[in-house]
Amino acid sequence: MWRFTLLRSLGLDVSVVCLALLASGSAVAGEAWQAEWDKVVAEAKREGQLGIVVEQIYHPVMETFRKKYPEIKFSEIGGPSTSERTQKVMAERRASLFLRDIYIGSPWNSLGEGSYQLCDPIKSALILPEVKDESKWWKGKHRYDDPKGEYIFVYEGVIKSGTIVYNKNLINPQQIKSFWDFLNPKWKEKIVAFDHKPNTVGNIADGLRLFNFHPQLGQEFIRRLYGEMDITLSRNYTQMLDWLAAGKFAFAFFTSPTETQTAIVQGLPIANFPGPHFKEGGIVKHLIGVMCLMNKAPHPNAAKLFINWLLSKEGQISFQNTFVPRSEGLMGPSLREDIPRDIIPATARRESCVNCMEYTHDMVDLTPVTKFIDEVLAKSRK
């Protein structure tokens, strides 16, 4: 209080002085992040390389980054599957070779719950204010796909609804407004589903999470689907789609979006149920959009540069523009809320799915669900 009295005695407006001090503090903070960023960019260019574990379909995104920072060359581990890429990384590490800085792409669950232990906390690498500002992201927060919520950053939110495909010659999609409509006796023996064994990962995992955890579905829906409908199980996506196109089945559950899209382009009489088609909505989850900063990164500044660029507006527009058009919104909708949404089909926009539930990490373990399915199947076959 004595300070304000002194200021007034000197003829100074206290409010003006306070505003000036606040502005000065903001300027200092602004200068601090800018100085840190400039140093990271300069050091990244000096390092000149980024070791990255990435899916080949990310190449257009990488090319956008390369055009902006041509001084940074990529050293890449590719491969058709997350498992294959992970095995290559682990082989390097067993040989005490730490060559990779960043992992981006599909959820990194090949090593189970311990996958995140190959990463460093990514929060410390976030520098740009537009990236750190959580108000720019869906529901005002950053999301992580690890139990500690600090290692595997999620920047994509796709509406998943079981990845269900139907035969257009047999089905009018308006016949199916709810998941419960699949339990109509007329669809008995007309459903093929991807087998939940031996590994419950990928699309079937997302579908079973939706069925099990959604408050309007749950175990009763699973019990009736597997116990009453005489569904056929398959471990081959191509076989499922061929059977569906031939009319052997009316519906295929837990299919591959990539293979389904290829089949549609080839002219097979099949189509997807869009995410919010069902009154229960779906589950909002990531499919191709996670990133981790690998520990013992050999090019730490290039890693920070890439992380901040990919999570910036520019990087997320590049990501979204790469994946959304080729998948009709089944992959690639960014969790950033301050970038254009017009490229995303209306049926794939999160705001169109009022009953959608959000994936959380406590839904990871599906062992109780698959055990329950086995019990239901065993009883139905007696």
Image (cartoon, rainbow, N blue to C red):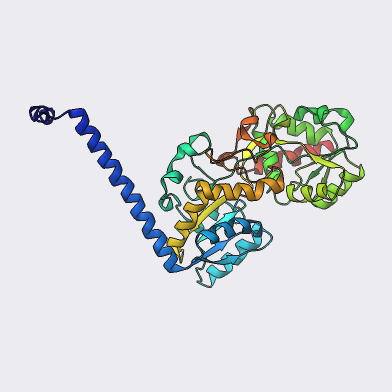
Q: Is residue 146 visible?
A: no
Q: Is residue 270 visible?
A: yes
Residues 88 and 168: in front is 168
When the figure is inspected, residue 182 is found, relative to residue 329, above or below; the finding is above
Q: Residue at x 71, y 49 (%)?
A: 326
Residues 380 and 302: in front is 302
Q: Where, by quadrant of the figure, is residue 227 drawn? A: top right
Left/right of residue 293 with respect to residue 272 in the rendered view? left
Q: Residue at x 49, y 66 (%)?
A: 71
Q: Residue at x 80, y 28 (%)?
A: 181
Q: Give the quadrant of the C terminus.
A: top right
Q: Position of residue 358 (x, y in %)?
A: 59, 35
When the figure is inspected, residue 279 is found, relative to residue 335, above or below; the finding is above
Q: Residue at x 69, y 39 (%)?
A: 208
Q: Position of residue 281 (x, y in %)?
A: 68, 30
Q: Position of residue 168 (x, y in %)?
A: 87, 38
Q: Residue furthest bottom?
A: 95
Q: Give the quadrant of the N terminus.
A: top left
Left/right of residue 342 with respect to residue 195 in the rendered view? left
When the figure is inspected, residue 135 is found, relative to residue 110, above or below; the finding is above
Left/right of residue 313 with respect to residue 326 in the rendered view? left
Q: Where, by quadrant of the figure, is residue 378 drawn? A: top right
